[in-house]
Amino acid sequence: MRSTPGERLFAGISHVLMIALSIGFLIPIVAIVSISLSAEADIAQNGYKLLPAKLNLEAYSYIFSTPMTLLHAYKVTIIISAVGTLVSLIMISACAYPLSRRDFAYRRIITFYLFFTMLFSGGLVPFYILMTHYLHLKDTYAALIIPSLGNVWFVFLMRTFFQQLPEALAESASIDGASELRIYTRIILPLSKPVLATIGLMQLLTYWNSWYPALLFISQKDLYPLQYLLQVMLQNINEIARNMQNNVMVDLTAAAKLPSENMRMAMCILAIGPMLFVFPFFQKYFAKGLTVGSVKG
């Protein structure tokens, strides 16, 4: 079937618009890479450029001056991202499945209870006391994983997706003698790859970019996640710059060599780089999982 001139015009305009948007999304990333590879003096003189005036690796050399510290931070971030994402998917799906079943007697009460936690929280001080004094999780991996494990919005999203699946699947499996656990693991989860991939990607990004739990509960440098380590390094450079402005005695020779703007951008590259390679594996599921799971409440 041949398309009409109007349809071809609409398709052409749509393609041009999408290409323009894609270029607009790529320009900031290219600029960040360019600035991270520029010298501090060139940035001060010429401003931000899409191409560096002269290739300079001083920002990366400063960050990698203590490679073992950075590798430890990557290790911690990878561990908490992998374990946290896996455990959170198990928890969220296990909570969403019974809430999606119409024959579950307490689903309305539990749904209201979960929704209530989205409106009110216990506060920072009780949370800190619970984690440190009662659970004794200070300076542990659990302190970095537990705060982001549960997300009520993800529970509702996955519950809604489960409700889109035909009830006849679970009913026929139950008639054949399958238990609820077997129905959940062998039927529901394999059919829910889009929503699992969508929520898994969101949780993965949450853990990868997490730094606040480390600020509260971590004092050992070997347990610093990547984002918190980069933030500490940047704070150290800013502190030296402030001391220079306040005429405090510092090593001016060393301070003059410290990168600032290019180091900020180099930190961005180190932080977001791995996620740029992970996202394409989730892309084909992302849009479907986010839209199908939000069709009805």
Image (spheres, grey):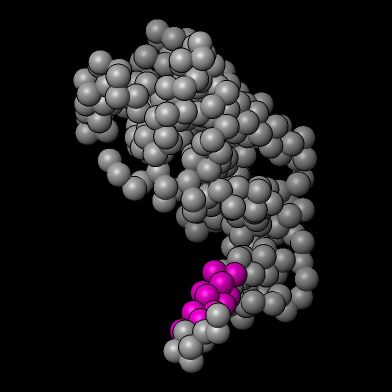
Magenta highlight range: 9-26
Query: Can residue 234 be seen from the camera position used here?
Result: no
Where is residue 238 drawn, in percent x and y? 53, 52
Specify whether 265 is left or right of 21: right
Question: Residue 59 placed where, x, y %?
Answer: 70, 57
Residue at the spot 47% in from the left edge and 22% down from the top edge: 172
Quarter of the image where the C terminus is located? top left
Q: Residue at x 77, y 53 (%)?
A: 61
- The part of the image, by quadrant, that contains residue 102 is top left
Query: Relative to residue 246, is residue 159 drawn left or right?
Result: left
Q: Quadrant of residue 134?
A: top left
Q: Position of residue 183 (x, y in %)?
A: 50, 20
Secondary structure, magenta segment, majority class: helix
Magenta segment includes 248: no
Q: Is residue 165 visible?
A: yes
Q: Is residue 193 left or right of residue 72?
A: left
Q: Is residue 46 above or below residue 293?
A: below
